Image (cartoon, grey):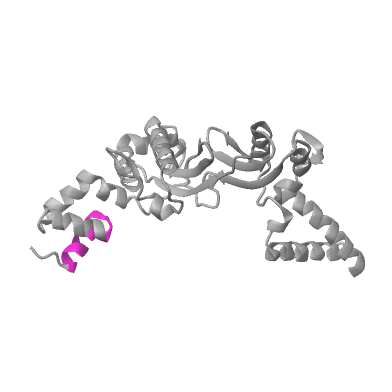
């Protein structure tokens, strides 16, 4: 039977599944709409896709390391309740280890990596778990990081994976690298070095600080000098290397690393749900949704 565009459209509207999934289902079922719907439900696609517009800003971040390669990722769920589910955490482990074994680095390609013999691809696994757990799940972001033999990873998870930090240091040991990652977890730097900060960010901050100084009644020349001093303070807040070291506030993080024979090369910091809209449900509603399978 010919699979027409109208058939695909009708199945898409009925199931909430993607166009290509609907086309495949109709092809597999010889154009039978009811059978195609059953096909999508059996595969978990219809149920998963219907949750696509829901907010998933909870979840966990994690880090996986194998030799000179590391993977840091964030997987989201709709509720914190589900993020503590063993099935959810096992899914994250499966995803992380599958990425470690692959050669791909971009998210689109990673979703097509084989998760395991039973689950199919990582994308298939997420769809299946979405259907089973009953919440929208998504692999929000991932970064694959490599290092050389004279470099070390610093991996640190805070609050069970609500914050994950991966650093790469050259010349120092893993203990120093972990200290740097703990610093980043606690102090939330946006950049590693002052040279990493975009000019637009610095210029905007400089204008704000200048306006503040002028509003304090300072002459223009004095205001300019005050701005430069406050910019240095701004750098100490947003740049990892410039921050006062949390274990010894008399030195910077950069000095601490240097004193231990190393230098900072890279930092990746994931905080679950940062920059995302969050659900406003209370815990009781959350539990009832789980009970009712919504």
Farthest residue, direction front: 149
Query: x, y (%) of residue 162?
Result: 54, 38
Residue 219, can we see it?
no
Q: Is residue 63 above or below residue 140?
A: above
Q: Nearer the viewer, residue 11 or 105?
A: 105
Return the x and y of residue 4 as percentages of the image width and height.
15, 67
Q: Quadrant of the C terminus?
A: top left
Residue 263 falls in image quadrant: top right
Q: Residue at 19% of width from left, 63% of height from top?
A: 8
Q: Is residue 165 above or below residue 53?
A: above
Q: Residue at x 27, y 47 (%)?
A: 47
Count the marks.
Answer: 0
Position of 59 compared to 150: left or right? left
- Whole-percent x and y of residue 104? 43, 50
Q: Quadrant of the N terminus?
A: bottom left
- Identify which residue, 93 or 42, lies in the foreground: 93
Q: Position of residue 180 (x, y in %)?
A: 68, 39
Q: From the viewer's perspective, is residue 86 above or below residue 166?
A: above
Magenta highlight range: 5-19
Reply yes or no: does residue 86 show up in magenta: no
Instruction: Inspect the magenta stretch and tell me whether residue 14 lies in it.
Output: yes
| Visible residue check, residue 147 | yes
Which secondary structure dominates the residues rendered in magenta? helix
Residue name at image x 31 percent, y 37 percent = 292
Location of residue 43 (image quadrant): top left
In depth, the one of 276 and 102 nearer the eye is 102
Q: Left or right: where does residue 98 sit relative to residue 247?
A: left
């Amino acid at each position: 039977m010919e699979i027409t565009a109208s058939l695909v459209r009708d199945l898409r509207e009925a199931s909430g599944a993607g166009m290509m999934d609907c086309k495949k289902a109709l092809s597999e079922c010889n154009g039978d709409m009811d059978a195609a719907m059953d096909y999508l439900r059996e595969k978990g696609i219809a149920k998963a896709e219907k949750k696509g517009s829901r907010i998933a800003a909870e979840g966990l971040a994690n880090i996986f390391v194998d030799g000179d390669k590391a993977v840091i990722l964030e997987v989201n769920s709709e509720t914190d309740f589900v993020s503590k589910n063993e099935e959810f955490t096992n899914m994250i482990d499966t995803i992380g280890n599958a990425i470690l074994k692959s050669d791909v680095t971009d998210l689109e390609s990673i979703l097509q990596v084989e998760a395991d013999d039973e689950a199919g691809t990582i994308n298939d696994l997420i769809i299946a778990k979405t259907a089973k757990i009953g919440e929208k799940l998504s692999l929000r972001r991932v970064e694959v990081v490599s290092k050389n033999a004279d470099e070390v990873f610093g991996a640190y998870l805070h609050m069970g994976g609500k914050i994950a930090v991966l650093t790469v240091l050259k010349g120092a040991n893993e203990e120093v690298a972990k200290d740097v990652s703990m610093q980043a977890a606690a102090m939330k730097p946006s950049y590693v070095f002052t040279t990493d900060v975009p000019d637009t960010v610095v210029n905007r901050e400089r204008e704000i600080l200048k306006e503040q100084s002028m509003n304090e009644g300072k002459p223009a020349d004095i205001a300019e000098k005050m701005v430069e001093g406050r910019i240095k303070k701004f750098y100490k807040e947003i740049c990892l290397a410039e921050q006062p070291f949390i274990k010894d506030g008399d030195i910077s993080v950069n000095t601490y690393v240097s004193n231990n024979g190393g230098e900072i090369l890279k930092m990746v910091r994931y905080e679950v749900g940062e920059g995302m809209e969050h659900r406003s449900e209370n815990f009781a509603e959350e539990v009832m949704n789980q009970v009712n399978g919504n």
